Image (cartoon, rainbow, N blue to C red):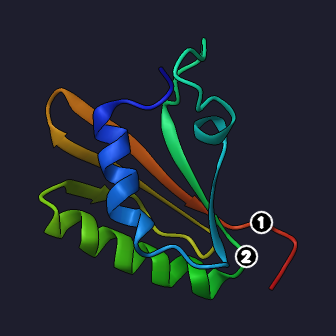
């Protein structure tokens, strides 16, 4: 199964804040069938602009924390943000927000 219960919860929380400049990619999308041989180890959220990325990080982190999820942000960069998202010691997930490098 590619997405566990905790990952599904994180996706539900951040889904309310997606916009046309923000989309899920990577293995989570490619291996979404319940019988997929590969499990997703992170959530890759892509953005078309740096402004969309910055706003999404702010809003998503707030929503996750409001939902009782611990979010530990890595060193922010203009085009990339990484965070460790966890509910408890047994449920840790990396949450990535990236932006294509083809410009605004």
Q: In terms of image quadrants, where is residue 45?
A: bottom right
- Percent x, y of residue 64: 25, 63
For marks 2 and 1, the one nearer the N-term is 2
Of tags 2 and 1, the one toward the viewer is: 2
Instruction: Please name whichever residue, 77 or 93, is drawn nearer the observer in this view of the structure.
Output: 93
- The relative height of residue 30 versus residue 62 in the rendered view (above or below) is above
| Secondary structure at numbered mark 2 | loop
Q: Position of residue 9 (x, y in %)?
A: 30, 48
Looking at the rendered image, the quarter that the C terminus falls into is bottom right
- Classify 63 as above or below 91: below
x and y percentages locating residue 76 in the rendered image: 47, 69
Residue at the image position 63 percent from the left and 29 percent from the top: 31
Task: Answer with the quarter of the image where residue 103 lies.
Answer: bottom right
Contact, mark 2 vs mark 1 (Cβ under 8 Å): yes
Q: Residue furthest front?
A: 34
In this rendering, position of residue 67 left or right of residue 99: left
Residue at the (15%, 69%) spot, across then down: 66
- Is 22 on the left-hand or right-hand side of 69? right
Residue drawn at x 36%, y 79% is 59
In the image, residue 33 sits, relative to residue 21, either above or below, namely above
Q: Is residue 90 left or right of residue 41?
A: left
- As drawn, the label of residue 59 is none
Name the residue tied to disc 2. Answer: 48
| Residue holding disc 1 | 100
Where does the image place residue 93, in percent across and percent down from the top left? 36, 39
Q: Residues within 10 Å of mark 1 (few under 14, many from 20)?
A: few
């Amino acid at each position: 199964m590619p997405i566990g219960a905790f990952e599904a919860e994180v996706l539900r929380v951040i889904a309310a804040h997606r916009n046309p400049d923000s989309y899920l990619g990577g293995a989570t999308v490619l291996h979404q069938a319940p019988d997929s041989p590969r499990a997703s180890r992170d959530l890759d959220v892509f953005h078309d602009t740096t402004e969309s990325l910055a706003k999404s990080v702010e809003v998503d982190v707030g929503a996750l924390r409001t939902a009782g999820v611990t979010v530990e942000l890595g060193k922010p960069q203009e085009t990339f943000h990484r965070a460790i998202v966890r509910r408890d010691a047994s449920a840790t997930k990396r949450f990535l927000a990236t932006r294509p490098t083809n410009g605004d």
